[in-house]
Image: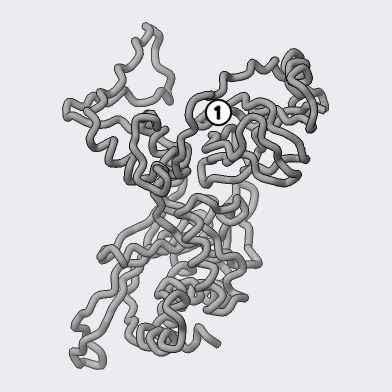
Amino acid sequence: MAEFLVLPSVVANARDGTIARWLKTEGDAVAAGEAFAEIETDKAVIEVPSPRAGRIARILHGDGATVAVETPIGVLTDEGEDSAAVSRLLSVAAPEKQASANGHATPAPAIEPAESDKGKRIFASPLARRLAREAAIPLDGIRGTGPHGRIMRGDVEAFAAASPAVPAAEPPARTAEAPAPDAPAAAVEVDIPHVAVPHSAMRRTIARRLTEAKRTIPHFYLNADIAVDALLELRARINADRPSDGRLSVTDFLVKAAATAFDEVPACNVIWTEDALLSLRRTDICVAVATDGGLMTPVVKDAGSKSLSTISAEIAELALRARDGTLRPEEYRGGSFTISNLGMYGVSDFTAIVNPPQAAILAVGAIEERIVSWDRMAVDARMMRVTLSLDHRAIDGAVGAQWLSRFKELVENPMRILV
């Protein structure tokens, strides 16, 4: 029996998604649970499994199409069903939407099948397809340098760099009506030659959340300079007996130290809501990871109960899949605290914006050699500057200072982290 394949609501509160690519073409067989398409959300690229075995009889929305959740994107039929079954399904209204809160269902409009691409199939990596789509570059004009002519990220970037500048679109004419109080800012006029790269769903989400956080959260900041000689020496001894792909990073130690500090200062492990202050009973620490599409914060869940080796392995795996765009929603949603480490880029110190609904974020700068005074003697030490940004609605200054003091003590005495 013919049925619609719909775009699933793969992320809580998601309203739409983009079809990164179809993994099946029209006429292909698909097994129950087998992925038939990749959907790009504002955070990751997720495979969509088939609800049952059958055949992809029709593709209604092709690669690059952005559609609302629960919208039919294809038609699945049983083996042996002819095109008449597809025509019958398309001739009636699409499946009804989920019942609303009052218990009444609203029928969706009839679906018009989109014309599928019957030309030569273009092979390209998911990232290359996304970059080309965002830059409005047709893939059929790019020569691939990957295996068997596959178009890679570098091919798209090289094509964009060699293409003539694309002028910014002229803003639409405004009516004589007075603008609303929250009307968007006027279009920016740029005289410098440039290429207009449309915002991805991820970039728009990042921009919206950061603007909201900076506008609504009363931030305050605490700084600390931490001596890390003991930590680096302990790390070197541990890594000497570990394989190259399993060595501990400084961030691994910081995550474990932060989780331990929260265990000892639980008043900092909180989330502000308008109705109550939520005192968390578990420490889920997000680690900021830079990706081509923007910053992502995969979560190390219940970090306080895990060993340093387990934390290290999880961070490495999560960071790899964050850059590949293959994180599952539950791996980047939530979290009680975030660590953002820009030290590897040579940044001495910086302040970070709290990631709502969390109440704090730690910005970690580079490790630098300095001459410092200890017991009235000048000594050479390796120092790291950190900045703790906090939501003053949820955490008072003294409580934040207590947590930072404990965190510093643990980092400077790293053997206590391993206990």
Q: Nearer the viewer, residue 257 or 93?
A: 93
| Amino acid type shown at disc 1 | Gly
In the rendered view, would you say 127 is above or below 113? Answer: below
Residue at image location 58% in from the left, 28% down from the top: 67
User: What residue does disc 1 label?
Assistant: 62
How many numbered marks appear?
Answer: 1
In the rendered view, would you say 213 is above or below 412? Answer: above
Where in the figure is residue 137, as x and y percent of width and height?
36, 30
Residue at image location 61% in from the left, 37% down from the top: 24
Where in the figure is residue 291, as x and y percent of width and height?
41, 52
Which of the colour schemes (rainbow, by chain, secondary structure, one colour) is used? one colour
Does residue 58 appear anywhere in the picture?
Answer: yes
In the picture as drawn, the residue positioned furthest to the top comes out as 176
Residue at image location 37% in from the left, 61% down from the top: 221
In the rendered view, would you say 94 is above or below 132? Answer: above
In the rendered view, would you say 298 is above or below 101? Answer: below
Q: Nearer the viewer, residue 211 or 203?
A: 203
Q: For this view, does 89 lie left or right of residue 237?
A: right
Where in the figure is residue 220, as x and y percent of width and height?
39, 57
Does residue 204 appear anywhere in the picture?
Answer: no
Residue at image location 63% in from the left, 29% down from the top: 26
* Residue 364, image quadrant: bottom left
Q: For this view, does 365 lie left or right of residue 32?
A: left
* Residue 84, image quadrant: top right
Q: For this view, does 149 lie left or right of residue 26?
A: left
Q: Nearer the viewer, residue 226 or 48?
A: 48
Which quadrant does the C terminus fall into? bottom right
